[in-house]
């Protein structure tokens, strides 16, 4: 058993120490107290970092969903995104068009 500090665990998982402490507090990552220090077993830290497969357009593949209920909820959300006319090539930053939006808003208030 190799025990890691919170900082070493964060470095291993490439997350912040706050995230590691949240995992410990939530019970997702087992830890032990050694004196006043908290230590995490390296095997537990490696176990928490499980890979996720992502399909086309960023949708999780069906094997990654935990239940049929969750799968139907995710499918419903993607149908809503498709109804809204999602365009992956469209700009996602409003700041790119801020002058256009400001001009339209100015025209609306000064007619």
Image (tube, rainbow, N blue to C red):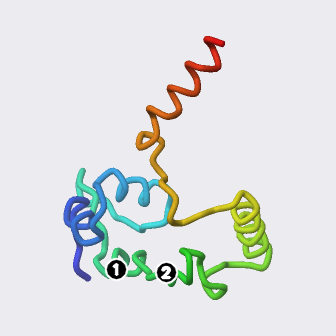
Q: Who is closer to the viewer here, 106 or 59?
A: 106
Measured from the top left, where is residue 44 in percent x and y?
37, 77
Residue under numbered circle 2 = 52
Residue placed at 28% from the left, 54% from the top? 17
Residue placed at 58% from the left, 23% from the top? 105
Residue under numbered circle 1 = 46
Direction from residue 60 to residue 36 in the image, left or right:
left
Q: Who is closer to the viewer here, 36 or 19?
A: 19
Front: mark 1 or 2:
2
The quadrant the N terminus occupies is bottom left
Mark 2: which secondary structure? loop
Mark 1: which secondary structure? helix
Q: Who is closer to the viewer here, 25 or 110?
A: 110
Residue placed at 21% from the left, 59% from the top? 7
Residue 85 is labelled as: none
The quadrant the C terminus occupies is top right
Q: Earlier in the sequence, mark 1 or mark 2?
A: 1
Q: Is residue 17 above or below residue 65?
A: above
Q: Is residue 55 above or below residue 13?
A: below
Q: Is residue 96 above or below residue 11?
A: above
Measured from the top left, where is residue 59 in percent x and y?
59, 76
Direction from residue 27 to residue 13 in the image, left or right:
left
Q: Quadrant of residue 3?
A: bottom left
């Amino acid at each position: 058993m190799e025990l890691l500090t919170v900082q070493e665990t964060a470095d291993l998982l490439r997350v912040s120490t706050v995230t590691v402490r949240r995992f410990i507090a939530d019970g997702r990552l087992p830890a032990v107290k050694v004196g006043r220090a908290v230590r995490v077993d390296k095997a537990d830290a490696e176990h928490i970092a499980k890979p996720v497969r992502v399909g086309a357009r960023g949708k999780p593949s069906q094997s990654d969903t935990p239940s049929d209920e969750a799968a139907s909820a995710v499918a419903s959300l993607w149908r809503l995104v498709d109804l809204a006319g999602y365009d992956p090539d469209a700009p996602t930053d409003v700041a790119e068009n801020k002058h256009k939006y400001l001009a339209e808003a100015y025209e609306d208030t000064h007619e």
